[in-house]
Amino acid sequence: MFSVGQDDDNRLFAWLTFIIDHYALSLTSDPTGEIREQEAWALGSSQAKTAASLTLMGIMFTHDWPDDRIEKLMRTSASEAVWASGPGRLKDALAIAQEVSGLRGNTPEFAYNFACLQSRLGNTDAAFDWFNKAIALGHSQVVRAKEDPDLEQMRHEHAADFADLVSVKYQWSVDTGIFHGDVVLTNNSKFPLTDVVLNATVDQNGSSWTQTLKAELIQAGQVQRWSNVLPGGSVQADSATFSCDQDW
């Protein structure tokens, strides 16, 4: 889930739980479910301190708390909150995530984090289903998914399907006319490709032409056409090298 930094100091997490419990955040005060979604990921994350920090900031900014209220919370002793719990309240996280899934389930962030949570609980079929949904909703951080420790069980149990789902797939060709030629690339991956670089080399009429072609974003199934980047005429041979953020 949250991939920045691990810390054995759980005081901030306990403090966060204390705040949530004592200020009774619910769907009444959180009509979009955003805060309780963040709470679920904080409870279920294997990097609890970072998750807690992000959740606390979200609560403060969403509710536009006055400075004096924030200051009062900052003075709350960690020892007063330690009863609340530590990291790994996975069943609590699952209950909250299920509660807000109807409100938040159509975002790639929710789907990805719910996949992480289900995987940590050992529900690998549900984890793969939610990960598949995250990809369908536009999640493109497949390199992260290949390494995320929260998805380890799911990757193990669904190795072949996971590998296929996160594979970069593309097809390119040269479309030549009388005067000019285009280079066409189709993204056959299940996810968007970002920072795409295609170095295409084409042999035409005894000459070799090389073009470095770039695209910031090519959506899944999208065709990218670079127009008039080659001279016209028949092609005797072509080759290319390809790179993108998702390819490693």
Image (cartoon, grey):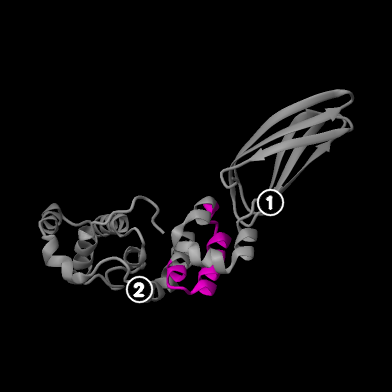
Question: Picture quarter containing residue 65?
Answer: bottom left
Ranked by sequence position, the earlier of labels 1 and 2 is: 2
Residue in view at x 26 percent, y 60 percent: 59
- Which is nearer the eye, 117 or 57? 117
Can you say which quadrant of the picture contains the C terminus?
top right
Cα–Cα gap, marks 1 and 2: 36 Å
**Label ID, residue 17:** none
* Mark 2 closeness class: few <14, some 14–19, many ≥20 residues within 10 Å: some
Residue 210 vs residue 63, the one in the foreground:
210
Residue 126: in magenta span: yes
Image vertical order of residue 193 relative to residue 43, above or below: above
Amino acid bearing label 2: Ile
The x, y position of residue 212, in whole percent, is 67, 30
Residue at 19% in and 67% down: 18
Label drawn at residue 96: 2
Instruction: Please say whether residue 240 is visible from this viewpoint.
Output: yes
Which residue corresponds to mark 1? Answer: 169
Q: Provide the residue span drawn in magenta.
A: 117-142
